[in-house]
Amino acid sequence: MRYPLRGFWITVAILWAVLCIAGYFYSKQQGIPDSAALAVILACLVEAAFYIAPGFASVRQRLSGVRSRYLLAGFLAVSALVPYVIFAGLSSTFEWPSFALLGLIAAVIPFWFAVLPKHPATDLGFLALVALVFLSAIFQSIYIDPYPRVPAEMFGKLMSIRLGIASALFLRGVKGTGFGFVPERKDWKIGILHYLYFLPVGAALIALTGFATLRSLPADPAKLALTAFASFLGFLWVVALSEEFFVRGLLQQWLSKWMNSPVAGLLIASLIFGLLHLPFRSAFPNWRFALLAATASLFYGRAFQQAGSIRASMVTHALVVLTWRVFLV
């Protein structure tokens, strides 16, 4: 069965309209020059289309149908360079060394599975590579901010996420992740339940460790609700999507298979997830954040196991992050 691309292009058109409107008003509000705003918006439109593409069955079918692994890896690598060329070219920040370094990153990630044999060491190396690229400050040196309040490195972050996802799905041929942007009814139910299960545990840990304190909420409830809704979508489709795909969809699933133990896979993946949070928010090691993240990861992992889909754990994850960002400081 061949799926039409109409749904994908309709979604792209709607997304482009939203991004153009949001980008226009944000640039005017922040006093960003038109030239810088145009560079960011156009690059954003291209990156957004590439970013959402794997979420559509029609796109996945066509990419999975490419017979040459090297051709597909090459296409993914080139797609990673397009937003940079648009952004850096229009903002006059293009530098050949940055382009070459980005090209190296863009080539290594997809060609990893195209060249290397299928093996646990290859899989773990891939996850380490993606984590190293994403968590490092390398994109700050590649993407030069054309104006204050324009975090250009976001293009590199988004590129590394979708390049890693596409490489795992289409070149490694990973199954059983339940990858997608829109949770189904079952995913919402399981995700919300595991969020509710985590709340008392998380509250107790925060109280015991002094990780955070309650935030003073804005007086305008309508503004708070709108901000919370927009933030939830951002957390769901970027933070939760990326972390749940790589940690739950890949690492936890692989560990469970290799060790023949879903429990061991859940525990080890959650421990690693917690350790990855040691450098964040304060001087290393931030053990409070790591402990809270590892504990929350147990609930994310259980949601994934119960639903058989990262979309359930994405819901749990996004709700936990939203609660933290809205109510805690």
Image (cartoon, helix red, strand yellow):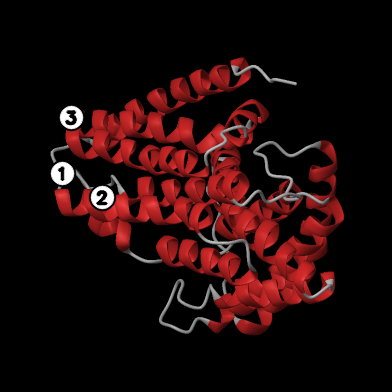
Tell me the residue at 39%/29% (across/down). Answer: 45
Q: CA distance from mark 2 to mark 3?
A: 16 Å
Tell me the residue at 62%/83% (across/down). Answer: 209
Viewer-side residue, 93 vs 285? 93
Q: Are marks 1 and 2 in contact (CB under 8 Å)?
A: yes
- List the residue tagged with mark 1: 93
**Numbered disc 2: secondary structure:** loop
- Residue 4 in the image: above or below residue 278: above
Given this view, does label 2 or label 3 mark the residue nearer the observer?
A: 2
Amino acid tagged 1: Thr
Amino acid tagged 3: Ser
The disc, 1 or 2, on the residue closer to the chain's N-terminal end is 1
The disc, 2 or 3, on the residue closer to the chain's N-terminal end is 3
Amino acid tagged 2: Tyr
Apparent side of residue 277 relative to residue 29 in the rendered image (left or right): right
The disc, 3 or 1, on the residue closer to the chain's N-terminal end is 3
**Numbered disc 1: secondary structure:** loop
Dividing the picture into quadrants, the one containing residue 8 is: top right
**Quarter that holds the N terminus:** top right
- List the residue tagged with mark 2: 143
Where in the figure is residue 165, as x and y percent of width and height? 56, 48
Dividing the picture into quadrants, the one containing residue 6 is: top right
Q: Are marks 3 and 1 in contact (CB under 8 Å)?
A: no
Q: CA distance from mark 1 to mark 2?
A: 8 Å
